[in-house]
Amino acid sequence: MSQKELLNRNEVPAEATWDTSTIFKSDEEFEVAYQKAEALLPQASEFQSRLAESSDTLLKAFGISQSTRDQRRASVCLFPPAE
């Protein structure tokens, strides 16, 4: 099995990259969303393997999920769907 080399964005031809300006207006806007997402990771990890415990647990996890709209946009930029 061959291993693919992960390139930096500036090394990838422009036609093979996502136009992230349709998701974030600037790099600064992306950075803010990314930092917020990173800060939520400890809270979200508290619910790992616990969602079926109770409706209260599920509701609390859903609350965190709802507060992460911009963070999900950031993840789309970082992890686009596989081709």
Image (tube, helix red, strand yellow):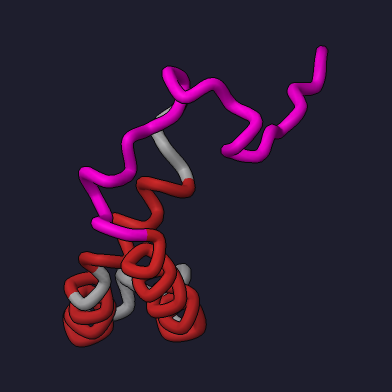
Main secondary structure along the magenta-highlighted residues = loop
Q: Is residue 22 magenta?
A: yes
Q: Is residue 45 visible?
A: no
Residue 5 against residue 59 in the figure, above or below: above
Residue 46 is left or right of residue 73, and the answer is right
Along the viewing direction, whichever of 37 and 46 lies nearer the viewer: 37
Name the residue located 41 percent from the left edge and 77 percent from the top edge. Answer: 44
Q: Position of residue 19 (x, y in %)?
A: 32, 35
Residue 70 against residue 74 in the figure, above or below: below
Q: Is residue 72 visible?
A: yes
Q: Position of residue 9 (x, y in %)?
A: 58, 38
Residue 74 is left or right of residue 69, and the answer is right
Residue 2 is left or right of residue 69, and the answer is right
Name the residue located 47 percent from the left edge and 48 percent from the top edge. Answer: 78
Name the residue located 24 percent from the left edge and 57 percent from the top edge. Answer: 25
Residue 83 position by quadrant: top left
Residue 33 is left or right of residue 58, and the answer is right
Q: Position of residue 53 (x, y in %)?
A: 32, 78
Residue 57 position by quadrant: bottom left
Q: Is residue 19 magenta?
A: yes
Residue 65 position by quadrant: bottom left
Residue 36 against residue 3 in the figure, above or below: below
* Quadrant holding the N terminus: top right
Q: Which residues are magenta?
A: 2-26
Name the residue located 23 percent from the left edge and 84 percent from the top edge. Answer: 60
Along the viewing direction, whichever of 76 and 66 lies nearer the viewer: 76
